[in-house]
Amino acid sequence: MQYWLIKSEPSSWSWNDQLGAGDAGTFWDGIRNYQASNNMKAMQIGDRCFFYHSVKEKSIVGIVEVIKEYYPDHTDPKGRFGMVDVKAVETMPNPVSLADIKAEERLGNLALIRQSRLSVVPVDKASWDLICQMGGLTS
């Protein structure tokens, strides 16, 4: 299993929207960056992703699971980009803010910090476990 972080603007698609999609989940579309797209191409069914509210909140609020691997994004008129489907798995009991992540030395290697503009980034297992612990979850 691999681990990821995916960002969403809560005004466009929030954690509550994701929860509302239920077990059927929903597609994760609209990615228009090649590096983020390549990260999604590497995702496999069963991989876990932190669901990150960007813009004002800047915090991890939940965990989703990849339920369908990369396929063409219907919102891309040029057909260059794709998407995956995800479903909500668990709400983060204590959202983990970007400030909390930056304050933790052991998380200094995260792409979330080094490549802050990317909307889909990998997360290593040790960082995943630590963030889950910070958020009140067991990994």
Image (tube, rainbow, N blue to C red):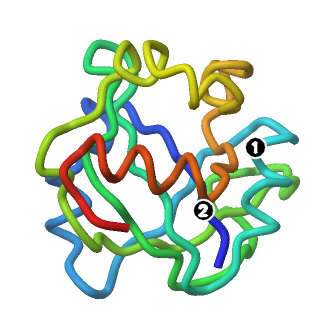
Q: Mark 2 points at which residue?
A: 3
Which residue is painted at 28% across and 66% down in the image? 138
> In this image, 82 relative to 51: left or right?
right
Calculate the distance from the C-alpha at mark 2 to the C-alpha at mark 1.
14 Å
Q: Name the residue under label 1.
A: 36
> In this image, 50 relative to 79: left or right?
left
Which residue is painted at 28% across and 53% down in the image? 62
Amino acid on which the number 2 mark rests in the picture: Tyr
Tell me whether the residue at label 2 lies in contact with that at label 1, contact meaning CB atoms closer than 8 angstroms. no
* Image position of 109 with respect to 117: above or below: below
> In this image, 47 relative to 122: left or right?
left
Give the image location of residue 27, x and y in percent: 49, 68
First in sequence, mark 2 or 1: give its number. Answer: 2
* Image position of 95 with respect to 109: above or below: below
* Image position of 37 with respect to 139: above or below: above
> In this image, 26 relative to 31: left or right?
left
Q: Quadrant of the C terminus?
A: bottom left
Give the image location of residue 39, x and y in percent: 78, 54
Secondary structure under tag 1 reads helix
Mark 1 burial class by Cα count in 10 Å: few <14, some 14-19, many 20+: some
Give the image location of residue 29, x and y in percent: 56, 55
Mark 2 burial class by Cα count in 10 Å: few <14, some 14-19, many 20+: some
Residue 35 image-quadrant placement: top right
Amino acid on which the number 1 mark rests in the picture: Ala
